Amino acid sequence: MDGEFKAIFISATNLVTLFQAPVPTQGPINLVVAVSFGLLVPSRILSVAKYGGLNVHPSILPEFRGPAPLHHTLLQGRKTTGVTLQTLHPTSFDEGKIIDQTPYPGVEHRAETVEDLRELLAPIGARMLVQAIRSRSFLPPIDEAPGYEGHGSPVESSYASKIGPKDRHINWTTWTASDILKRQKLIGPLWNITKALVKDRIEQREDVKRIIWDQGFRLLEEECHLFPAIGHPVIVGLHGPAQKVYIRTCDGNILVADKVKIEGQNTMEASHAARRSGLAPVPSGLNELRQSPHDFAAFHSRLR
């Protein structure tokens, strides 16, 4: 492998590479390199390269195998992490041979967002990749790096699945206020469904509405004398100029939603959106609102 070295670098910005094998224009391709790439690089791409492919993966494998290791590192509150350099497997995620790896337990971090964590790990991965290419450590026969699962590593195997709608669906019975605010920051917007009472020309009927918390929540700091059921929104401030939606979490905190989006509508004030969509009772007039003995009104149903 003397002389000029040619490689294909695959990133999320050149997805077209996955749909057609590249045609070398200046000699054969030696290596395919994938960095923070959440899709499987198919064998028809790897077969073009003389020495297959390398992947820079932002976790200490076998922990957080799969397409979203950065998200799951933060979602699970891990305070240490690292990088693994491995060969690309033609049919499976993160099942290649490990060439280099951050020693366990990894590097400490204070990242609060995926981008923060990526910026921390990017130079570590870059140095690891350059060193492997210079030393030709990816050439067969490959000596796997110590610390891999089969070599007595304390790291347990886990899968970092792609983030999808189910990961944003709030479970009010198990997610604490901290969990919700963390997911809101990392993978928001979050969502729920709940029951609405919709009036048509003939009768009132039940319907199901999806609520998208696209403006997020904030933690109520001041003392609250309301004790609503967990996950059952309450409109507070009926007698004042500003009405907010309060939701109690399973750990006893109150989250406040100032604005919300009901699916199919624009984002608007949460209390207005709830009444307009039939999620909460609508006063028949201003006098009824003022004469109410309570300064709050609950939604018709809990959030699901």
Image (cartoon, rainbow, N blue to C red):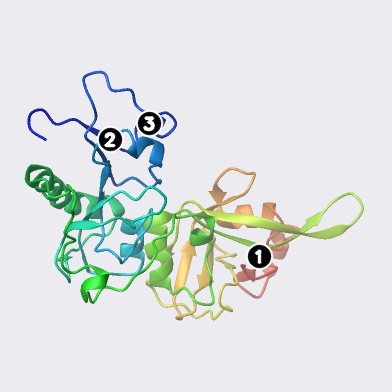
Disc on res. 17: 3
The residue positioned 15% from the left and 46% from the top of the image is: 129
**Mark 2 nearby-residue class (10 Å; few <14, some 14–19, many ≥20):** some
Q: Amino acid at mark 3?
A: Thr
In the displayed structure, 12 sits above or below 138; it is: above
Disc on res. 39: none
Horizontal placement of 53 versus 67: left or right?
Answer: left
In this view, the residue in front, 34 or 91, is 91
Task: Give the quarter of the figure containing the C terminus.
Answer: bottom right
Write down the residue under mark 2. Answer: 49
Which mark sits nearer the N-terminus, 2 or 3?
A: 3
Q: Which SS class for mark 2?
A: loop
Q: Which SS class for mark 1?
A: helix
**CA gap, disc 1 and disc 3:** 64 Å
Which mark sits nearer the N-terminus, 1 or 3?
A: 3
Residue farthest front in this picture = 141
Horizontal placement of 203 versus 67: left or right?
Answer: right
Single out the mark in the foreground, 2 or 3.
2
In this view, the residue in front, 135 or 123, is 135
Q: Horizontal and vertical percent for residue 231?
A: 57, 72
Q: Is residue 9 visible?
A: yes
In the displayed structure, 68 sits above or below 49; it is: below
Q: Horizontal and vertical percent for residue 152?
A: 22, 76
Write down the residue under mark 1. Answer: 290
Q: Amino acid at mark 1?
A: Arg
CB under 8 Å between discs 1 and 3: no
In this view, the residue in front, 287 or 284, is 284
Q: Amino acid at mark 2?
A: Ala
Q: Horizontal and vertical percent for residue 249?
A: 49, 75
**CA gap, disc 2 and disc 3:** 13 Å
